[in-house]
Amino acid sequence: MSHSPANPTQQTKAMLAVVWNKNRDLLLHRLDTIESFCRQLPDSASDVDLRSDASSDAHKLAGSLGMFGLSEGTSVAREIEYRLREDAADALLTANIPGLASQLRSLIEKFHVTVAEPEPERRRKLLIVEGDPVVARGIAATAEKRGIESRTAVDLPGARQLLQEDRFDVLVLDLATAQLSGNPAVEDESDQVRDLILSRAPMQVLALTSEDTFEDRVTAAQVGAHGFLPKTVPVMEIVDTCEHLLDLQSAQFKVLIVDDDVAVLNAIQVLLDQHSIRVTSLADPRLFWSILEETSPDLVILDLEMPNFSGLELCRAIRNDSHWNRLPVLFLSSTSDALTVTGIFSAGADDFVAKPIIDIELITRVRNRLDRDRLYRNLSDYDPLTSVRNRRSSNVVIANYLRLAERHGLPLSLAVIDLDKFKRVNDTYGHQAGDDVLQHLGSLLRQSFRSEDVVARWGGEEFVVAMFAMRRGDAIERMAHVLEGLEAHAFEASQGVHFHVSFSAGLSEFPADGKDLHSLYRVADEALYRAKAAGGRRIYSQYTEPAETQAPFDIAVVCADVAVSAPLRHVLEMRGYSVELYQSVSAALQDLAGAEASACARAVLVEPPLATAEFLRKLRAQSPAPVVIVLGEIADPGDAGVEVLQQPYKLSHLMQRLRRILPRS
């Protein structure tokens, strides 16, 4: 007997088959418990422990079998659970359990999920339902330029056929073309298309309308539209909105699932993984609070009945905590009577899904809850101009990360960023140009850091980044890449004038520089002040000393070509190193070697034309001897203290060596 779950993708089918095969023995073991109870009848009928164990396993089987498409098995398991929960004195009910157990074993042993080949990597797909071929081609051509594969339909039959044949990520739906309301002649066709659209969740739907009427908005809502635009907007804006919907669809949410049934956990993880939802599974509710704080999920899914702590108790604990009380909670339960559902919502649940879980229902409810919660959080927790966190919400998240860092002995680096001479940008190019700079920096920071890092705008041109489990040296390097990216971007003001901007940053590290956010911010802000005073365009920590007081300084660069050495100096100073340039061997030796040397470098970078054996020997004769790195191949380094980077060397390799040679405290 071969079955497949209803409407999953081929990829999901293949993965569910793996989960079924992995958990089949576990499911049969639960059936063993029930059969053991049956073999000991009639004595076991009055044994409370045996009856409870058998009832618990029947309950778990009822909740998990349906997820794989074995709905008949769910019905039989529920019947067994019902009879086990009845009064032990009812011998007739108990006597029927062995026959039901035998029937259930036969169903499980004959059942397998059809294994399908996993889907290959696919491009994002857009379906355009638009009666005007010119408009449809314009949308499709613009989307194709952005890497979005597009198909078009000019009427309802064409739309229905394409929806049946293929899977789309976004649907652009002209309501007039679709005629989804107000036309009895196409009522059956429109109902079929509407049902197809709704069954294709999480496909995003963008509705287009010629007239912004209430009826059109209701129709858009009926097909689950995520966006609504008048047809008069430029094609570019339509495609921009499609890309935004695609970003929403692919945004990686974090979900924590708590269920003592491992088979259910594994199956739900497979379903949600297919929709860019990162899942943390927990079978032991006693570990719930520590895992909650470690994972900081966007949504929690709780099973109702679990040992030690019930889902209701965990939900109440969430609602009673000031930090977590806004967290969305969705319940799973094999029982769905009015009393149970009332109790679930009274405990503070946001939604409820009955077992056995139907994949499309679970995915739709989870995505809807996550999307709605994200909308609320975007309004209250995020800066509207830059789309990064605001100060209030970032304080809460960073404080939580600091608690985790302390508990697990991990570092956390805090960067305070301030745009250089930002007032001059506003005064020279206008406030719109200034807003463009802030928006671009916000976008650059979001793209440059991990999902577990915190990026926030604390006001004006000041941004803060908290990097969890990252040490100071790694954080400086990460910030330097962001600064390089910002400096490389050409902003365009009015009349086509282009300009560039930079920022300065100060860094601190937990716990070395402080154990709370206030202390870390103070240290980072002081380092930022010194970076600004040194000329900006650089990243400092409290261990970065001003160049004029530093003895020895960090790095000497010996290179005859200023076009090579000047950019290298900027890259190094950007990372907080103090640097001196020398264009000749004689100038370098005068400062760095001999009895009358006036300076001392901890590391010397030498371009090959100047890296003579005599020069290298004299450098290494100093006490303390600097580490010498030759930036290219030479015939004979002549000393164990000389390192050679083969041309063309990568800047990242040079930075790694320098961080090893010149460690930051």
Image: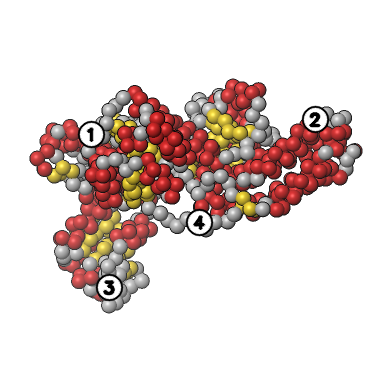
Q: Residue furthest bottom?
A: 635
Pointer 2 or 1: first along the chain: 2
Residue lying at 44% horizontally and 43% vertically, measured from the top left:
252
Amino acid type indicated by mark 1 = Thr
Q: Position of residue 487 (x, y in %)?
A: 22, 48
The disc label shown at residue 118, or none? 4
Question: How is the rendered protein coloured?
Answer: secondary structure
Q: Which residue is mark 2?
A: 86
Q: Secondary structure at mark 4?
A: loop
The residue most toward the front is 185
Q: CA distance from mark 3 to mark 2?
A: 85 Å
Q: Are marks 2 and 1 in contact (CB under 8 Å)?
A: no
The amino acid beneath tag 2 is: Glu
Q: What residue does disc 3 label?
A: 633
CA–CA distance between discs 2 and 1?
66 Å
Residue type marked 4: Pro
Q: CA distance from mark 1 to mark 4?
A: 41 Å
Dot 2: few (<14), some (14–19), or many (≥20) neighbours within 10 Å?
few
